[in-house]
Image (tube, rainbow, N blue to C red):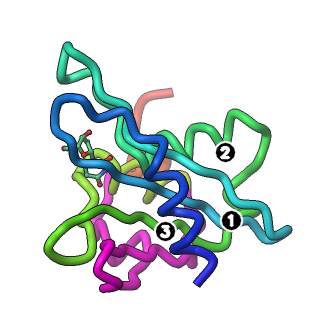
C-alpha cells in the first residue's frame, strides 16, 4: 500500500537520539502528492515535535489546505498500530477535514483506520464556543 510505503520513508528521516522511537507520517492529497513528517527530538525534551504535527504544519506552510487532504498515515515500530498523543489528536482534529481517513499502522503490518472525531471525540473547537468579540 502506497500510504504505508510513504509513511515508512518519512520515518527514516526521524531524529530520535533520546527515545529511539521513530515515527513517520504521510499525508495523501487529492492530486496524488504526499506530504511527509517525522518526529524531531531535542536535548530539551519538551521541544520534541511529533511526526503528525510536522507533516500537517509542513502541508499548511506549503500553501495546501484541509480541502486538499484525503488521508494521513502514521507508522512506528509499536506493539499495535501507533496511538497518536493527545496534542496531535487536537491538531489533527482542527487541520484535517472531517471525513479524512486516519490510518494508524505499525511495522508488523497491523493497521487501524479512524477519523478526526473517532480519534478525539468532543474536541475543543473555539469557533463553536461563545466568546468575547
Ligand atoms: N511521537 C510521535 O511522533 N507521534 C506519536 O503519535 C507518538 C509519539 C514521538 C515523540 C517522541 O519523539 C517519540 O515519539 C517518543 O515519545
In-image side of 2 versus 42 (left or right): right
Crowding at label 3, few (<14), some or many (≥20) Cα neighbours within 10 Å?
A: many
Which SS class for mark 3? Answer: strand
Quadrant for the N terminus in the image: bottom right
Residue 59 badge: 2
Locate residue 98, reporting x and y percent. Answer: 54, 72
Residue 2 falls left or right of residue 105: right
Q: Position of residue 129 (x, y in %)?
A: 39, 49
Q: Position of residue 125 (x, y in %)?
A: 40, 51
The range drawn in magenta is: 96-124
Residue carrying label 3: 73
Q: Are marks 1 and 2 in contact (CB under 8 Å)?
A: yes
Does label 2 or label 3 sit earlier along the sequence? 2
Q: How many marks?
A: 3
The image shows residue 91 at horizontal and vertical percentages of: 42, 48
Instruction: Choose the circle earlier in sequence order: 1 or 2.
Output: 2
Label 1: which residue? 69
Amino acid at each position: 500500500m502506497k500510504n504505508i510505503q510513504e509513511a515508512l520513508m518519512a520515518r527514516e528521516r526521524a531524529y530520535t537520539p533520546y527515545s529511539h522511537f521513530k515515527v513517520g507520517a504521510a499525508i495523501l492529497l487529492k492530486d496524488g502528492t504526499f506530504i511527509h513528517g517525522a518526529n524531531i527530538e531535542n536535548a530539551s525534551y519538551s521541544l520534541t515535535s511529533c511526526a503528525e504535527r510536522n507533516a500537517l504544519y509542513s502541508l499548511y506552510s506549503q500553501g495546501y489546505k484541509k480541502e486538499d487532504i484525503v488521508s494521513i498515515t502514521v507508522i512506528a515500530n509499536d506493539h499495535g498500530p501507533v496511538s497518536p498523543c493527545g496534542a496531535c489528536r487536537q491538531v489533527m482534529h482542527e487541520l484535517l477535514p472531517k471525513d479524512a481517513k486516519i490510518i494508524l499502522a505499525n511495522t508488523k503490518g497491523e493497521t487501524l483506520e479512524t477519523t478526526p472525531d473517532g480519534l478525539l471525540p468532543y474536541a475543543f473547537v473555539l469557533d463553536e464556543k461563545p466568546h468575547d468579540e
